[in-house]
Image: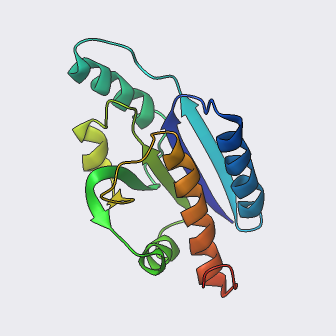
Amino acid sequence: MRTIKLIAFGKLKEPYLRAACEEYQKRLSAFCKLEVIELPPVEHKPMAQALELEAKLVLSKISKQASVAALCIEGKGMSSEQFAAWLDGQPSEIVLLIGSSHGMHEALKAQANLRLSMSSMTFPHQLARVMVLEQVYRAFSINCGRKYHK
């Protein structure tokens, strides 16, 4: 069974976002072992130092065998079917990185096998976690031929 690690900064504050994530975590349990790792945001000035400290925290959570997808604005946009194909072609451990509200250090982007953009639109930072989990669930549904994806 695949292992998916979702690494993000901060805790989800809104009950409706937590509920949505819990729902997708439950659904994903049929397809993979999902681990959501919430790291504390680094409040530090200057911002470059904060990003560097965040990168060190993240890198300590990633194994060398893992395939890493960094969610970043300059990343590649993909359809759900393209993301499903990418996911299907990866090794058994996949790490999805969501940076902090400061962004993501270049060292994390450089380590990534995929730089992925969810959209060219701007969304609330905490909503990204729900969106990523939904797309992972959709990808597994596509790859298994389930009717969830229409």
Nearest the eye: 113 or 116: 116
Position of the N terminus by quadrant: bottom right
Residue 59, given in percent of the width and then of the height, sits at: 40, 36
Q: Nearer the viewer, residue 5 or 21?
A: 21
Image height check: is 5 above or below 57? below
Name the residue rendered at 62%, 57% in the picture.
3
112 to the left or right of 91? left
Q: Is residue 54 left or right of residue 49?
A: right
Residue at 43% x, 49% y is 64
Q: Could you say which quadrant of the image residue 141 lies in?
A: bottom right
Above or below, 150 relative to 130: below
* Residue sitting at the far top: 45
- Give how far across and how far down residue 147 sits, in percent: 69, 85
Q: Position of residue 114 (x, y in %)?
A: 33, 61
Residue 117 falls in which quadrant of the image?
bottom left
Q: Residue at x 56, y 73 (%)?
A: 139
Where the C terminus falls, by quadrant?
Answer: bottom right
In percent of width and height, residue 30 lies at 77, 67
Q: What colour scheme was applied to this rendering of the protein?
A: rainbow
Q: How many marks?
A: 0
Q: Residue at x 43, y 34 (%)?
A: 58
Front residue of this view, candidates 4 and 124: 124
Q: Is residue 18 left or right of residue 125?
A: right
139 horizontally vs 16: left or right: left
